[in-house]
Amino acid sequence: MKIVKAEIYRVEFPLKEPFIISYATYPNMPAVIVKLETDTGIFGYGEAVPDEHVTGEQVSGTYEILKNVLVPEILGQNPFDIEGIHHLMNAAIARNPAAKAAIDIACYDLMGKAAGQPVYNLIGGQAHKDLQYPKVLSIEAPEIMAEKAKRAMDQGFSSLKLKVGGSDSATDIARIYAVREAVGSAMPIRIDVNQGWKTVGHAVQTINQLADAHLTWIEQPIRMGDIRGLADVRRKTSTPIMADESVQTMEDVLEIIRLEAADYINIKLMKCGGIFPAIQMAKAAEAAGIIAQIGSMVESSVGSAAGYHAVMARRNIQSAELTGPLLFSEEIGNLDYQLPYVKLSGEPGLGIRVDESQLQKLTVASCIVEGEERTDGQ
């Protein structure tokens, strides 16, 4: 079986409401969908959701790199040779993990369909009985976040994730305590600072004022790349620390292990290059006694399903936050959310049915790469 053709779509997913985090506000979510075809007539779908603030990628560049560099490189390859495909991609261009993730995910979809197995059976089996997801709240005024948190609890969510890291930590503290008061002491709450508290001193001072909020963990309180600083934060505070933007490569994971910089790591397919490297990183974390999570770059059903397959296959990956499809007013797939659970269908590959007409509707630009020929469309 060989990959003989690719269709590449640059799309924009409309959000129900703006998604607000410490470093950006998203009115909609740009992405790239890749559809690979083999000489046996099987199709596989992948997705790239680049984030210029984290990996330095932009959607227009990701589209062009897929079209002109990565897809031509992997045409003619067997999707089951996934390690070889990653070596080819890494030799062709450095970094660009979201673009590589799109190829990786599509290859796993092809492998699963060819084997008649869901992807999780190809990477470890069914390690979890069920998969849950939290309610994710964007940065807003304390009283609004508290109201939305109470509503989420009443709807049946079993945990909350709060985006903080706004203009000042005093307001962040007010947000967190307002939510805690609204939902009571039993509801698990995790917070994501998205680097917003920047320095070790600022982070430590703020975290120590949150002891009575009884947080499950605090995610990436300081700027990415400062793993030594993250270790300082962990030593000087008592709330568990999760590394996110600082976890992009296996080298990052090894440095976090060496410096004892985090209790948890947030692995995202878009940061590391797909399912294959994500599983390797999770295994390294497991060996060091660090718990992993598969996080979200706000992907559609395609990228979100890929992440949930990785979660399902690894006992050490104990949480997931792949809620992108719930944030969109229009989508292309049918990932099954049954609050507070997400249900993988068990069908071969990703188990996602892609609505081609909806994909075309949301497309900004598209092209076909097939052998030496390439056709573009707007």
Image: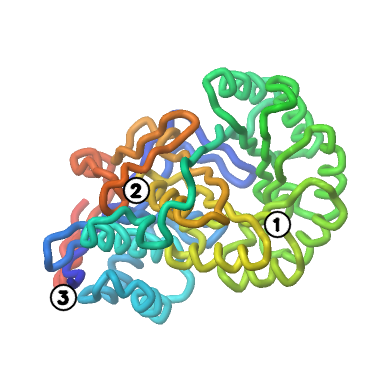
Judge the density around disc 3: few (<14), some (14-19), many (≥20) Cα neighbours within 10 Å.
Answer: few
For discs 2 and 3, the disc positioned in front in the rendered view: 2
* Residue at mark 1 to residue at mark 2: CA–CA distance: 29 Å
For discs 1 and 2, the disc positioned in front in the rendered view: 2
Could you tell me the amino acid type at mark 1? Arg
Q: Is residue 34 above or below residue 152?
A: below
Could you tell me the amino acid type at mark 3? Glu
* Residue at mark 2 to residue at mark 3: CA–CA distance: 28 Å
Residue assigned mark 1: 223
Of callouts 1 and 3, the N-terminal one: 1
Say which element carries label 3: loop
Which residue shows up at 29% across the image and 40% down it?
332
* Residue at mark 1 to residue at mark 3: CA–CA distance: 43 Å
Of callouts 2 and 3, the N-terminal one: 2
Which numbered dot is residue 3? none
Residue assigned mark 2: 302
Of callouts 1 and 2, the N-terminal one: 1
In the rendered image, residue 100, in percent from the top left (x then y), is placed at 39, 66
Q: State the residue in front, 140 or 123.
A: 123
Say which element carries label 2: helix
In the rendered image, residue 137, in percent from the top left (x then y), is placed at 59, 32
Which numbered dot is residue 372? 3
Which residue shows up at 68% across the image and 62% down it?
289
